[in-house]
Amino acid sequence: GENVGLHLPTLSVQEGDNSIINCAYSNSASDYFIWYKQESGKGPQFIIDIRSNMDKRQGQRVTVLLNKTVKHLSLQIAATQPGDSAVYFCAENIAGTYKYIFGTGTRLKVLA
Amino acid sequence: EAQVTQNPRYLITVTGKKLTVTCSQNMNHEYMSWYRQDPGLGLRQIYYSMNVEVTDKGDVPEGYKVSRKEKRNFPLILESPSPNQTSLYFCASRLTGGVVGETQYFGPGTRLLVL
């Protein structure tokens, strides 16, 4: 598969443990945030999103937390599985614009 | 199946030889966009389209052209490719063409090598 980032930070977790992936977003005017998962050889896949009027949003096994004070976003994956191994990156949409800013990503490795 | 498709998936070409990468979506989405992904960098937007016949430049439009003659198709054209356009390209679409926060759905990618 291709290298989406040669020197990505890597998070290694044991299967069954919880994972927390962090993202510092760049623009205080952003009001919509998305987490994507990218597996080797595939396009980014939507995981979960959150708007700036919320602090937390939960999906199936995933939770996104938003801290606007410090411009920080996190993705929590419960009971991490081998199929969760991928690169995860956040994206922000600047309010009132078509502009999306994408992070470079974190590689998640799930150890059996 | 709702999806964004791109063709070709892999392409090797030579400097200066015009090429087109096609993108098609079957979700009746108004907004479509093109990104390139390079090692160590986040996705960077090349061009986007809010609806048929409406397009605008993204962050890295130099060397690229697009057209949106039909709602479902958004081809990316490299009139005279150069080696610095070697990259992984993604097409994406989202439901509405307005300036609202919505997730984008991505195609599988086209890996381009310009010699």
Image: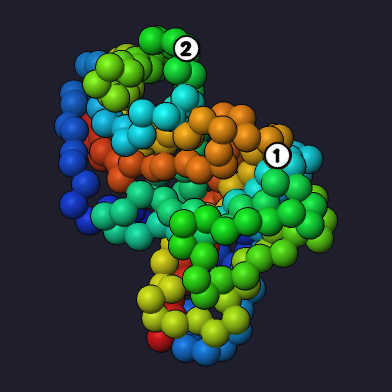
Residue located beneath label 2 in the image = A53
Residue lying at 30% horizontally and 45% vertically, measured from the top left? A104
Residue lying at 26% horizontally and 40% vertically, measured from the top left? A107
Residue lying at 39% horizontally and 10% vertically, measured from the top left? A56
Q: Could you say where residue A63 lies in the image, as x and y percent from the top left?
A: 38, 14
Residue at mark 2 shares a chain with residue at mark 1: no
Q: Is residue B95 left or right of residue A13?
A: right
Secondary structure under the numbered disc 1 in the rendered image = loop
Compared to residue A77, the image places residue A105 above or below, namely below
Q: How many marks?
A: 2
Secondary structure under the numbered disc 2 in the rendered image = loop
What is the number of the mark on residue A8? none
Compared to residue A99, the image places residue A93 above or below, namely above
The quarter of the image holding the C terminus of chain A is top left
Q: Is residue A7 left or right of residue B84?
A: left
Residue located beneath label 1 in the image = B97
From this viewpoint, is residue B73 visible? no
- Which color scheme does this rendered protein use? rainbow
Q: Which amino acid does the dot numbered 1 rest on?
A: Gly
Q: Could you say where residue A108 lies in the image, as x and y percent from the top left?
A: 26, 35
Q: Could you say where residue A50 lies in the image, as x and y percent from the top left?
A: 47, 19
The quarter of the image holding the N terminus of chain A is bottom left
Residue lying at 59% horizontally and 47% vertically, measured from the top left? B92
Compared to residue B17, the image places residue B54 above or below, namely above
Q: Is residue B29 left or right of residue A92?
A: right
Compared to residue B106, the image places residue A96 above or below, namely above
| Residue at mark 1: chain | B
Q: Quadrant of residue B101?
A: top right
